[in-house]
Image: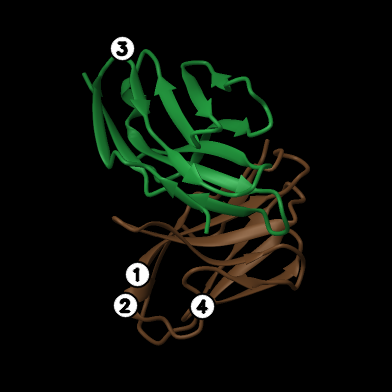
Chain colours: A brown, B green
Amino acid sequence: DVKVTQSSRYLVKRTGEKVFLECVQDMDHENMFWYRQDPGLGLRLIYFSYDVKMKEKGDIPEGYSVSREKKERFSLILESASTNQTSMYLCASSGPGQGKNTIYFGEGSWLTVV
Amino acid sequence: AQTVTQSQPEMSVQEAETVTLSCTYDTSENNYYLFWYKQPPSRQMILVIRQEAYKQQNATENRFSVNFQKAAKSFSLKISDSQLGDTAMYFCAFMTPNYGQNFVFGPGTRLSVLP
């Protein structure tokens, strides 16, 4: 069974703090993604990675960075959290192998910045 | 640019009835995949159904089926015998299998199944 795990479901951080959101997949997928979901705005792609140490900007990369040191792990970093980054963050993975070119999502991380 | 449009922001259906959610997309690619995802109040995104563009036969999964019209670039989802548990946000999505597997999502349709 495919599995994408986001380690933190609910976080509350202060403005200016550095925030790490971790994501792990067990499907040996090449591609991993970070999305942000806000009411009325749908899913917006922040960054994606198609290989270890590779990253590409999505639609809204400002204020975020990512790290992919191992194939199974993709981290989203907020260097200095701001209140407008309060949102739900979804990690996902995909690949031509297990899961047949389908994107699979984690359960989401709810981040509140105060 | 590739886009996905869902023209119905909200819909409702009585329990046990049938409902169809619309989706259109725009692409110049010939090889692609289409998906419907369900997001219930728990916010977990769940794959409902998947269609490969080169397959003419419409995909079905139990009570869920699609009407894939490639020439019209239309990919609607039909839910038969609607159940209360079908209440969710439904997202149509499109993917081209180039590097990075670019997924494009529609804005979603909020479906309420009424008892």
Q: Nearer the viewer, mark 4 or mark 1?
A: 4
> How would you rate the neighbour count of disc 4 (Cα within 10 Å): few for under 14, some for 14-19, many for 20 or more?
some
Point out which mark residue A64 bears.
Answer: 4
Q: What element carries label 3?
A: loop
Residue B71, image x and y in percent? 54, 33
Q: What element carries label 4?
A: loop
The numbered mark, 4 or 2, whose residue comes first in the sequence reads 4
Query: Which residue is under mark 2?
Result: A83
For the residue marked with disc 1, what is the amino acid? Thr
Q: What element carries label 1?
A: loop
The answer to whether marks 4 and 1 mark residues whose Cβ atoms lie closer than 8 Å is no
Residue B106, image x and y in percent? 42, 48
Residue B63, image x and y in percent? 46, 16
The answer to whether marks 2 and 1 mark residues whose Cβ atoms lie closer than 8 Å is yes
Query: Which residue is under mark 1?
Result: A86
Kindly report the distance in space between the C-alpha atoms of the residues bearing marks 2 and 1: 6 Å
Q: Mark 1 lies on which chain?
A: A
**Could you tell me which residue is drawn at 67 percent across and 53 percent down?**
B101
Kindly report the distance in space between the C-alpha atoms of the residues bearing marks 3 and 2: 43 Å
Kindly report the distance in space between the C-alpha atoms of the residues bearing marks 4 and 2: 14 Å
Point out which mark residue B16 bears.
Answer: 3
Considering only vertical position in the picture, is A94 above or below B112? below
Q: In which quarter of the image is residue A21?
A: bottom right
Q: Which of B47 and A109 is in front in this view?
A: B47
For the residue marked with disc 2, what is the amino acid? Thr
Considering only vertical position in the picture, is B108 above or below B70? below
